[in-house]
Amino acid sequence: MYHKFNAKEILEMAAIIEKNGHDFYKKAAEDVKDADIKIFLLELAEMELKHEVTFQEMKAGLTSKEKADVVFDPDDESALYLQALADTRVFFEKKIDTSSAQEVLKEAIVAEKESIVFYLGMRDMVSDDAGKAKINGIIKEEMSHIQIISTKLLALN
């Protein structure tokens, strides 16, 4: 089934993914032994929360056209679909080796890349007049995470 999304729906998914990212980093921080990496992971968890707020603010600023339904959904099943999609696409029950700081950071980069790939795919399902530019904003936010994590990883080597 092909579902055409509007910016509001994508931003709702983005907020869920960011919450899942927060939980992912928080759990990794609990399990990792290296104190410096623990602090870094907690900082990443906080960044995920800030991104969640950013996406909620972006959603609040959408025009009525960007919020308009693009499919008929009288039973509001789209919300359930979006929840399931966001929960299973990125940061979903990731198992990471927390005994190595490098491995933790490598897995974090993989998760961030997966989120970017997800958003790139979703961007193609949003028309220009339904808020495609907003999706580009999400992608830039996620790319900044990769840069931050990569810098930390390179510093460990």
Image (tube, rainbow, N blue to C red):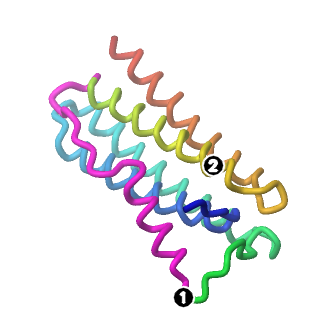
Residue most extreme to the top: 157
Label disc, if present, on residue 138 of the rendered structure: 2
Query: Quadrant location of residue 85?
Result: bottom left
In the rendered image, residue 93 lying in the magenta stretch gets the answer yes
Q: At 19% across and 34% down in the image, what residue appears? A: 98
Quadrant of image for the N terminus: bottom right
Residue 84 placement (x, y as % from top left): 41, 65
Q: At 44% across and 29% down in the image, what residue appears? A: 149
Residue 129 placement (x, y as % from top left): 84, 60
Residue 92 placement (x, y as % from top left): 33, 51
Residue most extreme to the front: 1
Q: At 60% across and 60% down in the image, what residue appears? A: 2
**Where 112 sits versus 156, above or below?**
below
Residue 26 placement (x, y as % from top left): 30, 50
The amino acid type of the residue labelled 1 equals Asp
Quadrant of image for the C terminus: top left
Query: Quadrant location of residue 128?
Result: bottom right
The amino acid type of the residue labelled 2 equals Ile
Dot 2 alpha-carbon crowd within 10 angstroms: few under 14, some 14 to 19, many 20 or more: many
Identify which residue, 124 or 20, lies in the foreground: 124
The residue indicated by pointer 1 is: 75
Q: Nearer the viewer, mark 1 or mark 2?
A: 1
Identify which residue, 56 or 67, lies in the foreground: 67
Label 2: which secondary element: helix
**Where 129 sits versus 144, above or below?**
below
Label 1: which secondary element: loop
> Nearer the N terminus, badge 1 or badge 2?
1
Q: Which residues are magenta?
A: 75-102
For this view, does 19 lie left or right of residue 23?
right
